[in-house]
Image (cartoon, grey):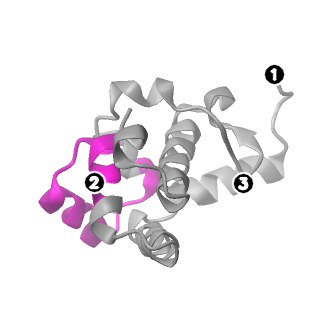
Amino acid sequence: MTTGPLSSRQLANMQRLFATPFAEIYPLYVTKVQRKNRSEAELRTVLSWLTDLDGTQLNQAIASGESLQEFFARVTVHPNVVLITGSVCGVKVQEVEDPLMRNIRFMDKLVDELAQGKDLERILR
């Protein structure tokens, strides 16, 4: 999917998302998966797979107040993220051009899959 240049509004929205602290996103993910009878431990497993952070490092990322941009700048994203396909909010994750936005969408997609009841083995490609 090739799109034209982003509007100034779209760019502003992306920058606002990039500046959002990971600590603000994390409790939203916890709520989402728990509403669907999944555990926070399973969420942490998925996030650890994606970012190569252990439990202590994940706690530090939450406590630090770092933005999503800072968070993804310092983590190592799992090489198998290229196997993640599908849509988040109507956007195919594999077609997102901006690398940071693509990583955020990959994270969203994994959380969605967990909330949808998929087995961890399938989520952790």
Residue 119 belongs to magenta span: no
The span from disc 2 to disc 1 (Cα, nearest Å) is 34 Å
Amino acid at pointer 2: Thr
Picture quadrant where residue 60 is located: bottom left
- Considering the numbered disc 1 on the image, is that residue within a helix, a strand or a loop? loop
Residue drawn 51% across and 62% down?
115
Stretch in magenta: 44-69
The span from disc 3 to disc 1 (Cα, nearest Å) is 20 Å
In-image side of 71 versus 2 (left or right): left
Q: Which mark is drawn over residue 2?
A: 1
Residue 85 percent coordinates (x, y): 59, 32
Residue drawn 44% across and 65% down?
21
| Above or below 81: residue 40 | below
Location of the N terminus (image quadrant): top right
* Disc 2 target residue: 45
* Disc 3 target residue: 12
Q: Circle 3: is it few (<14), some (14-19), or many (20+) Cα within 10 Å?
A: few
- Viewer-nearest of labels 2 and 3? 2
Residue 103 percent coordinates (x, y): 49, 40
In-image side of 33 versus 112 (left or right): left
Residue 63 percent coordinates (x, y): 26, 72
